[in-house]
Structure formats: C-alpha cells, structure tokens
Image (cartoon, rainbow, N blue to C red):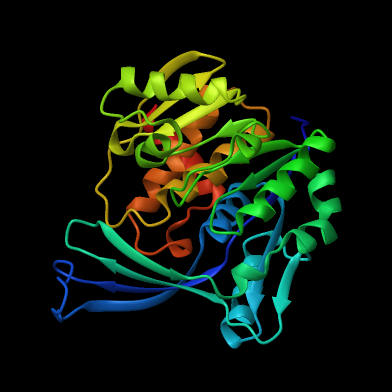
Amino acid sequence: MKKTGKLAVLGSINADHILNLTQFPRPGETVIGKQYQVAFGGKGANQAVAAGRSGANISFLACVGEDGIGLRIRQQLVEDKIDVTPVEVVAGESTGVALIFVNAEGENSIAIHAGANAALTPVLVEKHQQTIADADALLMQLESPLESVLAAAKIARQHQTQVILNPAPATPLSDELLALVDMITPNETEAEILTGVHIESDEDAARAATVLHDKGIYSVLITLGSRGVWLSENGNGQRIAGFRVKAVDTIAAGDTFNGALITALLEDKPMDQAVRFAHAAAAIAVTRAGAQPSVPWRDETDSFLLQQE
C-alpha cells in the first residue's frame, strides 16, 4: 500500500437507539431500562469514523435518509475527518436505525431497520466507482446489499485497490465474492458460518483460516474477543493478544478495530504493529458507551500504546 494511502469505506449508516437494562426481556416481558441515548452507528459509519479519527485519508460511500438525523450524521462525519461527497441523500427514505439493548454484563442485543442503507445499489456503486478506483484500499461490511458489495469488490480488483471485508453481520458468502477479497476480518461466529469450523482454540482458528486461504484470501484475521486476534498470512498463523481493560459495552469494538487496523496498514506499519494499534483503539472503545461516541482519536490511541510499553 502507498504512503499517502487513500481509503474508501463502503457501508451502512444508522441512528442507534441504546437502552441499558439489568437483563434482556423475555418474550412478553416488559423491563425498566435506564440511560437511553441516541448515538450514530452502523458498521460502515463506525469503521469510517474509526479510520477518520485514527488519521486515515478517507472517503465514505453510503446513504442516509431525507430526514433531520441523516443531515446531522453527515455533519458529524465531516467533523470526524471523513470526505462525505459520496454519501447520498435518498429521497423519501428514512435513515437506517438500530435498536440496541445493553445488559449489566455489557453484552448487547440488536435489531436493525435498513432504511436508506437498502438504496446503496450496484447502480450507485457504479456512479461512485472513481472513489474506489482512486483508493489504495476498500473496506466493506455486510449491512449493505450483497450485490453492491460484490460490484464494489469487482471495481476494486480492476483498479488494484486492496479489498478488506469485515463479514458482519454473519451471513454465508459466495466463493465469487470471497475470491475478490485480499483481507478478511471475521469474529468466531462469522468465521464458523464461512468455513464450517467451530472455533474454541487457536488450532480451530488456524483450521478456519486455512479454509479461507483456500478460497483465495491472503490475509485472515479472526477476532477472538478478549483473547485477541488470530492472524494468518498465506498460511502462517499466530495469535496476537489484546489489552485487558474494564469493558462498559462492546458496541463498535470490532468496527473500531477494523478502521484503526486499515489506517495503520495504509501508513505502511508492519501487520503485527498494525494489529497492536487496532487492539489499542478497540480497548479504549470498550471502556466507553455507545458506537461512534466511544471511538478514540489518534492521540488517545498513541498515548495508550505508550503506557503499555
């Protein structure tokens, strides 16, 4: 990747409605929540914000609704150092929403309405293909229509733009799409859906990585929660531990990891250092509430890393 590494992110934008509960409600049960907040989220936007705040040169290809919250999100993205020229306002559609419950353990339970995110069609991807062509790396997730993810990956491949896929939320993917991916960053659940390998140990992670390598993917990073990440490049694997912190909630931890990781790689950091940088950013994010409000700025991540040495 080039020094001035340009990043394109394609993905979703949501308004997250977050409610903290002692425990999740059972069917038919009403529970009293506390600390209700509306925060900006969506996997695409979270990863774009993580990259922007980490110092990446980034453009974001996404859709918002023709509503007040869509306007406010676009303004916020600009403050997060993101080029929002390719963010389209979709007439007559609402901005995507996520309804999020967080329990006392910091676990979350989420339901999503796509809204304007569903309007990110292959036609729109085609319209903004120059953004992808000009980038050194394209980072995507799976809250956008799958045919659009595939269309963008094809454009990226034509222009030697590296394709990084965070295959979340978990869904089966075609070999056609996987063959276009240079780097994939699933968690254990997502890796199992893509490979059929249930992951409980490093050996399992290595086996799952091999299946993904066989589909044509060079770099596989399987995130293992508190155990860190299994990094496998062309079949050479190692586990890189994360940092121990007191978690408030894990919303956007994976997104923060992805955005920070790609930023570091675009600065030509070696992979193990880039993973460490991403671990640090994610560690800070889990100590704070919400999605984008929890994402750290570059100076915070750098000083966290200095304290670890």
At x 40%, y 19%, the residue is 206
Q: Nearer the viewer, residue 129 or 264?
A: 129
Image-quadrant location for residue 226: top left
Instruction: Tell me the quarter of the image containing the C terminus.
Output: top left
Q: Nearer the viewer, residue 79 or 192?
A: 192
Residue 256: image location, x then y, percent: 48, 49
Give the residue at the far top of this rendering: 236
Q: Does any portion of residue 76 appear in the rendered image?
A: no
At x 69%, y 59%, the residue is 82
Residue 39 versus residue 142 in the image, above or below: below
Residue 135: image location, x then y, percent: 79, 43
Residue 170 versus residue 3 in the image, above or below: below
Q: Tell me if 82 is positioned left or right of 48 in this view.
A: right
Residue 232: image location, x then y, percent: 49, 20
Q: Tell me if 300 is positioned left or right of 71 in this view.
A: left
Residue 205: image location, x then y, percent: 37, 24
